[in-house]
Amino acid sequence: MSTVELPPDGMNLLQPDVTTDEEIAQFRKFYAFAKKEQNKSYEFWLEFGPDVLKRHKLRTATRTAGPGYPLPALAALHQYVISGFYDGIGYEIELARTMGARRGDILDTISVAFIHSGHPGMYQATRHADALRNYTEVPDAERFPPNWSFDPGAFDSGMDYSIREATPEDLRRLTDWYERVLGEVPKNARFLAEHRPDLLKAYRNRYEHAIRESLPAQMLPFLMLHYNVVRGFKDGIRENALLAKALGLTRQQVLNAICLAELHGGAEVFDLVAEAAGDVLAQLPD
C-alpha cells in the first residue's frame, strides 16, 4: 500500500507578485485531476489578484505535517456538511476519493457530521448521493496513519440501548466511561444526566454508533476537534483533545486537526485552543 501522491499544483508560492501563464495552467490541471472541477474561489483570485491566492495557498501548505492522507479533505467534508455548503461537499468528496478514501470513509464522515448538521446540512449532502452511488475507490491506497484502525466498538459506554429510558446503571456506566477514557466528565454530560437523562442516552446512542463502515476510530476526535475549533467552543475542544489522547493520536496529528480550522477562524482560534487544551497537547507524544 502507498500514500496517494497528488501532482504539484504548479504555483511558486514564494513569489506572490509574479504569476505566469504556465503556473495558472498547471494549477488548473491539478484541480481538474484532484477534484474534477475548478475551485471558484481560486478562479476569482486568478482573475483579480493572484497574489491573494498565492498567500492563501502558502498558509494551506504549512498548516499540516506528515503524509498526504485524506484527513484534511474529510475534515473539510465534515465541516461543509454541518454548514450546508453544497459545492464544498461535492468538492471534498472528490478530493478525498482521489486521495484514497473509501466510500465507507465518506459515509462515516457524513454520519458524524449529521450529529451537528441537522437537516439543513443533510439536505445538501443528499444532492451528492449519485457521487456515492457511483463511487470508484483508489485500490490499495494508504488512507490513514499506521496506528489508526476501524473499531466500531471504540466508544461503547455499556449503556443498554434496548430500552429508551436512562437507568441509574446506564448513567453510572457512562460516568465510568468518561472518567476512564477522558479522565473527567464533560459539563454537557453532567447537565443532561441531571435534567434530561433520556436525551443524554439518545445522544450517546448516535455518538457511539456514528462510525460503522470503515473510518478509523481516531477520526472521530479529529473531526470533532476541528469543528469545535472552527466554532470557537472551548469545552468541545478540550473534550476531543482528551479523546484524541486516549486513542493514541500524536501531538502533530492533533495539531493538524486544530490548524486546519485556521481557514475558517483565523489565528484567533488558537487563543481558545491554548486555554482549553494547552495542557493536553503538552502531554502528547510527538
Image (cartoon, grey):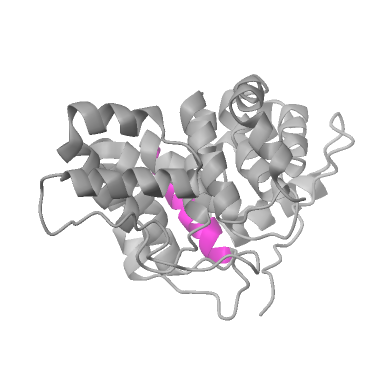
Q: In the image, what residue occupies the spot 69% across and 76% down?
A: 2
Task: Specify the quadrant of the image occupied by residue 7.
Answer: bottom right
Q: Is residue 115 above or below residue 234?
A: below
Residue situated in front as seen by the camera: 125 or 157? 157
Q: 240 or 179, which is in the foreground?
A: 179
Image quadrant containing the N terminus = bottom right
Q: Nearer the viewer, residue 257 or 139?
A: 257
Tell me where residue 19 appears, x and y as whole percent.
Answer: 82, 37
Residue 82 as seen in the image, left or right of residue 141:
left
Question: In this rendering, would 30 be left or right of 186?
Answer: right
The part of the chain drawn in magenta is 85-98
Q: Is residue 268 visible?
A: yes
Residue 255, located in which quarter of the rendered image?
A: top right
**In the image, residue 191 lies at what x, y percent?**
29, 26
What residue appears at the point 25 percent right and 43 percent down from the top-left corner? 171
- Image x and y of residue 266, in percent: 64, 23
Residue 2 in the figure: left or right of residue 174: right
Viewer-proximal residue among 152 and 195: 195
Q: Magenta includes 86? A: yes
198 on left or right of 234: left
Magenta stretch prevailing secondary structure: helix
Is residue 193 highlighted in magenta? no
Residue 52 in the image, given as x and y percentages of width and height: 73, 27
Q: Is residue 87 visible?
A: no
Residue at image x 64%, y 45%? Answer: 254
